[in-house]
Structure formats: C-alpha cells, structure tokens
Image: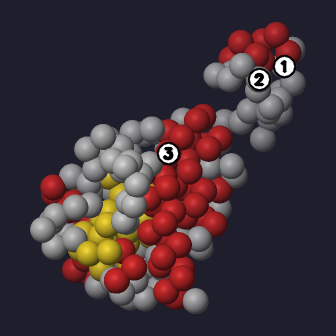
C-alpha cells in the first residue's frame, strides 16, 4: 500500500476539519450488503438517522456494549463520512456496519427469530426496562426529527424511556445508548 507525505499547506486544504490530526487514508471496505445477522449476536438498526455525529456515536456505543453490528437503512447519514468516522472514535473499525439494510431484510430478521424493539411511542408502548432483551434482539432507533418510520414500527415492540423533566425527547445517540445498555444489563 503506497504511503504519501504531503506538504502541510496542501494537506490542510484537502481536509474537512480546521485542525486535522495529521493523517488521512483511503480504504477499501468489505461488501456487507448480503450480511444477515446471527441469532447469537445483538444488533442495532438505524432508521434514517441523519446526523453523522449521532451515527458515529451509535457505532461507538454499539462497539462498547459488545454489539456485533449496526444496520443502516437507506436515507441514513453516510457511514463513511469523515464526521461519522471521527465520532465513532475508532469503533468504526471494530464492528460490522451494513448500509442500505432494507425493511425487507428487517422483516427477514424477525422471521428468523429476532425480537425487534424500537424507541417509539404507540398505544402499546411499554417502559424499556420491562421487555425481555435476553432473547435474540435488534434495537431500532429513528430519525432525529421524525423517529422510527411507520413501516419499521410495524415490525417492532415499541418501548419508551421515561422523561421525568420537561424535555420533549432524547438525542438519538443517548436513547440508543440507554437501550443497548439495558440489553447488556439484562444479559449480565
């Protein structure tokens, strides 16, 4: 693999940050488009999460919580954008990331035996601490402005994280972390 050293003035011009860390890379990624999850592992599904910083945070948290992979719907932020990669703080390289994971694939996961829990409100929503996440599980989180799509919600058991103050909602990265670590708590 070739290695190039650039003059600082040129390096700074091609970076997307004001204070780059002095290294950049072009890498080939594995094709995970046909990857299907294993019932023995845990996964998180991001339904149109649009902010690359939030996506990177979810990837980082999934890695920290021991999840096998992160599935991204069409319409998610670019998994390979510099902001996503930076926000993942290296976890990007430790966990499976599958882009364009369709609702049809999510349906196939449910048929395979996964329980799918979404942080969303509907008439049957229950406290996230009251569902059994010791079974094969996929956690779904939605878009920052609109939440989980109705198509995805139909496949899920909806759970809520109690909000005790006056905040309208939680950041998607924070909500994802709470849900993932509830799964960890239940399994340890």
Quadrant that contains the N terminus: top right
Question: How busy is the neighbourhood of tag 2: few (under 14 within 10 Å), some, or many (20 plus)?
Answer: few
State the image coordinates of residue 25 (x, y, percent, origin top left).
71, 36
Which residue is identified by label 3? 54
**Mark 2: secondary structure:** loop
Q: Position of residue 71 (x, y in %)?
A: 41, 59
**Looking at the image, do the residues carrying marks 2 and 3 touch, with CB atoms under 8 Å apart?**
no
Quarter holding the C terminus is: bottom right
Classify 20 as above or below 177. above
**Which corner quadrant of the image does residue 123 belong to?**
bottom left
Mark 1 and mark 3 in contact (Cβ < 8 Å)?
Answer: no
Q: Identify which residue is drawn at 30% across, 40% down.
A: 145
Residue 14 as seen in the image, left or right of residue 61: right
Image position of 43 (left or right of 91): left
Total residue callouts: 3
**Residue 46 visible in the shown view:** no
Q: Is residue 59 above or below residue 110?
A: above
**Residue bearing the label numbered 1:** 6
From the image, state whether disc 3 or disc 1 is nearer to you: 3
Question: Which comes sooner in the sequence, label 2 or label 1?
Answer: 1
| Label 1: element kind | loop
State the residue lying farthest toward the front.
165
Residue 143 vs residue 26, the one in the foreground: 143
Q: Is residue 93 depicted above or below 18 in this figure? A: below
In the image, residue 151 lies at what x, y percent?
16, 57
Q: Secondary structure at mark 3?
A: helix
Q: Which residue is mark 2?
A: 19
Counting residues from the N terminus, which is met first, the one under dot 2 or under dot 3? 2
């Amino acid at each position: 693999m070739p290695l190039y050293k650039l003059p600082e003035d040129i390096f700074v011009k091609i970076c997307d940050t004001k204070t780059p860390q002095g290294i950049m890379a072009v890498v080939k990624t594995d094709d995970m488009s046909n990857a299907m999850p294993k019932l023995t592992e845990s996964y998180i599904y991001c339904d149109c999460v649009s902010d690359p910083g939030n996506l990177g945070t979810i990837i980082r948290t999934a890695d920290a919580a021991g999840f096998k992979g992160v599935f991204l719907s069409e319409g998610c932020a670019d998994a390979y954008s510099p902001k996503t990669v930076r926000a993942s703080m290296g976890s990007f390289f430790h966990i499976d990331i599958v882009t364009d994971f369709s609702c049809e694939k999510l349906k196939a996961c449910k048929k395979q035996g996964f329980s799918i829990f979404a942080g969303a409100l509907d008439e049957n929503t229950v406290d996230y601490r009251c569902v059994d996440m010791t079974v094969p599980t996929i956690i779904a989180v939605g878009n920052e402005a609109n939440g989980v799509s109705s198509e995805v919600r139909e496949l899920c058991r909806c759970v809520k994280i109690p909000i005790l103050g006056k905040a309208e909602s939680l950041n998607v990265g924070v909500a994802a972390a709470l849900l993932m670590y509830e799964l960890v708590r239940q399994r340890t």
